[in-house]
Image (cartoon, rainbow, N blue to C red):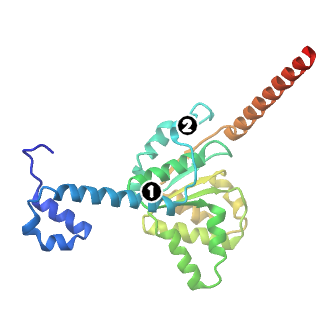
Amino acid sequence: MTTTEMPDPKELQSRLKQLGFHGLLAHWEEIHNAPWLSSLLAWEEAERQRRSLERRLSNARLGRFKPMADFDWSWPRKIDRAQIEDLMTLRFLDEGANAVLVGPNGVGKTLIAKNLAHQALRRGYTVRFLTASAMLNDLAAQDSASALEKRLSRYLRPRLLAIDELGYLAYGNHHADLLFEVISRRYGGEKPILLTTNRVFAEWNQTFPNASCVVSLVDRLVHNAEISTIEGDSYRLKEGQEKAAARARRRATSNKTKSTTRKTR
């Protein structure tokens, strides 16, 4: 702010109300021209934003993850980079649409999902990130209707619910019904789901064999959803093989050095 610019008194009052500074508002006529008022508001807003982000990061339970800058776009045989980058704008979240990442193990679905979740947190949204098995087993463990209803609220409340690794395990009908309940309620409330799966939708009957709700479940999930398909070999397997090869080279070099040392003695 330059010396010729003065803060708008109405804007200052509005910010005081939002922060709940009722004592200062009560003495508005005495303080509205105080030179420290704008700085005080800026400091308080910045601190609350910082603490809010810390709290939402803790509640989201993202854990450690690599940034998108470390993603090797050249590794997958098939990936729509423009689509992924568009997802990173969070337009799908603003529009209340779901996002589904489909692909085999190790192609970067979780890395992308965690970066999307982190981007949403930085934008001020509430997020919860967990595996499908953790959520479904948690819900299935509730021993009464009231306990289940209370626990469901944990997965219905966040603006974005990120469900990772659906399809790696098979579930019974009760688990399918629970997932249907979560998807249906969030669908009705226009609260998006971000989901990663290693199975195309035609194979979901293998994840939920004999479950009658699978077709309806998929229908609600994919309606107006952004679906990104990734194809390729496991990048983790590639990294593991490279690290194993590097260790083997170090051992070979070390053994060669030891052998040379013994011969020169």
For label 1, the crowd category at 10 Å Cα-Cα, with few meaning under 14, some 14 to 19 and many 20 or more, is many
Cα distance in 3D space between marks 2 and 1: 27 Å
Quick check: 50 above or below 13?
A: above
Q: Which residue is mark 1?
A: 97
Q: Earlier in the sequence, mark 2 or mark 1?
A: 2
Crowd band around label 2 with a 10 angstrom C-alpha radius: few (<14), some (14–19), many (20+): few
Name the residue located 53 percent from the left edge and 66 percent from the top edge. Answer: 183
Element on which disc 2 rests: helix
Q: Residue 235 versus residue 66: which sits nearer the camera?
A: 66
Residue 263 sits in quarter: top right
> Would you say 247 lies left or right of 121 here?
right
Question: Where does residue 145 sit, x and y in percent of width and height?
Answer: 59, 84
Q: Nearer the viewer, mark 2 or mark 1?
A: 2
Question: Along the line of sight, which residue is nearer the eye, 210 or 136?
Answer: 136
Instruction: Residue type at mark 1: give it.
Output: Ala
Considering only vertical position in the picture, is 110 above or below 218? above
Residue 222 appears left or right of 176: left
Identify which residue is drawn at 58% across, 69% down: 180
Residue with the most extreme front position? 265
Identity of the residue drawn at 57% across and 49% down: 101
Disc 2 vs disc 1: Cβ atoms closer than 8 Å? no
34 sits to left or right of 101:
left
Q: Which mark is residue 30?
A: none
Work out whether 114 lies above or below 30. above
Which quadrant holds the N terminus?
Answer: top left
Viewer-closest of 169 and 222: 169
| Image location of residue 99, percent across then percent down | 50, 53
Residue designated by label 2: 70
Q: Secondary structure at mark 1?
A: loop
Q: In the rendered image, which quarter contains the C terminus?
A: top right
Image coords of residue 121 (percent x, y): 43, 55
The amino acid at mark 2 is Asp
